[in-house]
Amino acid sequence: EAGKGGAVRLGMLEASGEYRFFCDADFSMPLEQVDAFLPPALEDVDVAIGSREASGSQRFDEPDHRHLMGRVYNRCVQLSLLPGIEDTQCGFKCFTARASQEVFSRQSLTGFGFDVEALVIARRRGFAIAEVPIPWTYDGDSRVRIFQDSIGMVLDLLLVFFRARSGRYDR
């Protein structure tokens, strides 16, 4: 499948094991942090998401304009679909096997907006979601194209909003 969302979807549906974790290719979060996403660090959580905004998180080397753009986008996400989730776009997420199958068999976006869609599906399916504070380092070689990908993410957000309102994710 095309795009990051398509690749993650395919990988999560093909994965095996009780917990299924995906991360950004640049490893901007140290892999040693993965234990914070699993029991015993987290109990009774179906979806653990890395957060650059949760209390105790740290950001390194991120340009101010990138931080501002992320905060504006996430505020729109919170107001429209996911109140209470501070950082939907951090690329480190862990799903239980059951949550992974239920979420990614319904998730369809292939662009960077797939994170929001997956979390909306998870919340609507009743899965417990927790944000995990992480140390995160900005990669200056990021493949995110600021304007083009931002427009795509906003369009994806609108699509998820209308799909959620129509009940598509509840079936």
Image: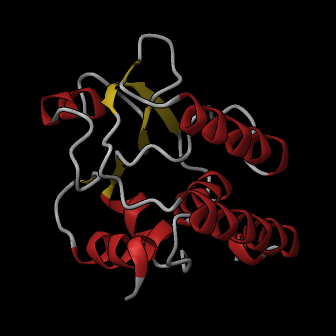
Corner quadrant of residue 58 = top left
Q: Measuring 31% from the left and 60% from the top, which residue is drawn there?
A: 97
Q: Measuring 57% from the left and 32% from the top, which residue is drawn there?
A: 67
Locate the C terminus by quadrant: bottom right
Residue placed furthest toward the bottom: 1
Viewed as shown, does residue 4 lie left or right of 147?
left
Residue placed furthest toward the top: 56
Q: Which x, y percent locates residue 126?
A: 61, 51
- Closer to the camera, 120 or 52? 52
Q: Tell me the colour scheme of the image.
A: secondary structure
Q: Measuring 55% from the left and 39% from the top, which residue is drawn there?
A: 66
**Residue 5 against residue 75 in the figure, above or below:** below
- Closer to the camera, 171 or 107? 107
Q: Which x, y percent locates residue 127?
A: 54, 49
Q: Measuring 45% from the left and 59% from the top, which residue is drawn there?
A: 144
Q: Which x, y percent locates residue 169?
A: 69, 71
Locate the N terminus by quadrant: bottom left
Corner quadrant of residue 3 = bottom left
**Residue 170 against residue 94 in the figure, above or below:** below
Q: Which x, y percent locates residue 124?
A: 68, 57
Total labels: the figure holds: 0
Residue placed furthest toward the left: 32
